[in-house]
Amino acid sequence: MDPNQISIDLYRNKAAGYDASAEFTMPLRRRTIALLRLQPGQTVIDVGSGTGLSYALLREGVGDTGQVWGFEQSPDMFAIAEQRLAQEAWPNVWHANQPAESVVLPACADAVLFNYTHDICRTPAAVANVLRQVKPGGRVAMAGIKFFPWWTGPLNLLAWLKNRPYNAKAADLWAPWSHVSAQCSEFEWHSTQWGMGYIASGIKRKELS
């Protein structure tokens, strides 16, 4: 079955409660966004933007003169983001209900956020299409789930079980940042959540322009 369709199906029943379930990881979301070092007037991409939970935080970084561009393939998650935008009436947020492999953004951006977008990060065509629309030297920030170190053994069953309800590629948790890091310089990652999560950042390599 198509991984994108699996993901859409997985989130059909999770969309309504997503914001409440994401409350636990909001501090990590803020840390990840801080790694982008956003400046007023910049443009930032929110990959797999879900319910638009990061939009307000990203707007704080780019200010009223900047732009936030998001995209989300789940119609159910996107519908909640639409409600959020209608309520907030943000003039500088653009978003689309499209998959990462084919989304076309208004122009190239200064920075990109991959926040808990595991299936996208493990799909080379999706990563390539997104990063193609980031300026050379643009900042990249990521957060997500990963396996514990190999020597912890059975704990990785927990990581897999935790990931399975949300992602089609739930078992692909060794270095889940690898497709992104391959296109970055100065890439660094650090463990979070007692080893089951990660936070990472880098700079899109200029030779990829």
Image: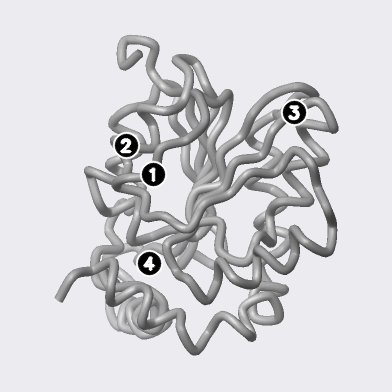
Residue at screen point 38% across, 26% down: 184
Q: CA distance from mark 2 to mark 4?
A: 29 Å
From the image, state whether disc 2 or disc 1 is nearer to you. Answer: 1
The N terminus, quarter of image: bottom left
Mark 1 — residue? Answer: 103
Q: CA distance from mark 2 to mark 3?
A: 22 Å
Q: Earlier in the sequence, mark 4 or mark 1?
A: 1
Residue at screen point 66% across, 60% down: 52
Mark 3 — residue? Answer: 66
Q: Earlier in the sequence, mark 3 or mark 4?
A: 3
- Dots 2 and 1: beta carbons under 8 Å? yes
Q: Which mark is residue 129?
A: 2
Q: Amino acid at mark 3?
A: Gly
Q: Secondary structure at mark 4?
A: loop
Q: Secondary structure at mark 1?
A: loop
Q: CA distance from mark 2 to mark 1?
A: 8 Å
Residue at screen point 59% across, 71% down: 79
The C terminus, quarter of image: top left
Residue 206 or residue 191, whichever sits in front? 206
Left of 123 or right of it: where is 45? right
Q: CA distance from mark 4 to mark 1?
A: 33 Å
Please determine whether, in this image, residue 163 is positioned above or below residue 174: below
Mark 4 — residue? Answer: 148
Left of 90 or right of it: where is 108? left
Residue 151 or residue 105, whichever sits in front? 105
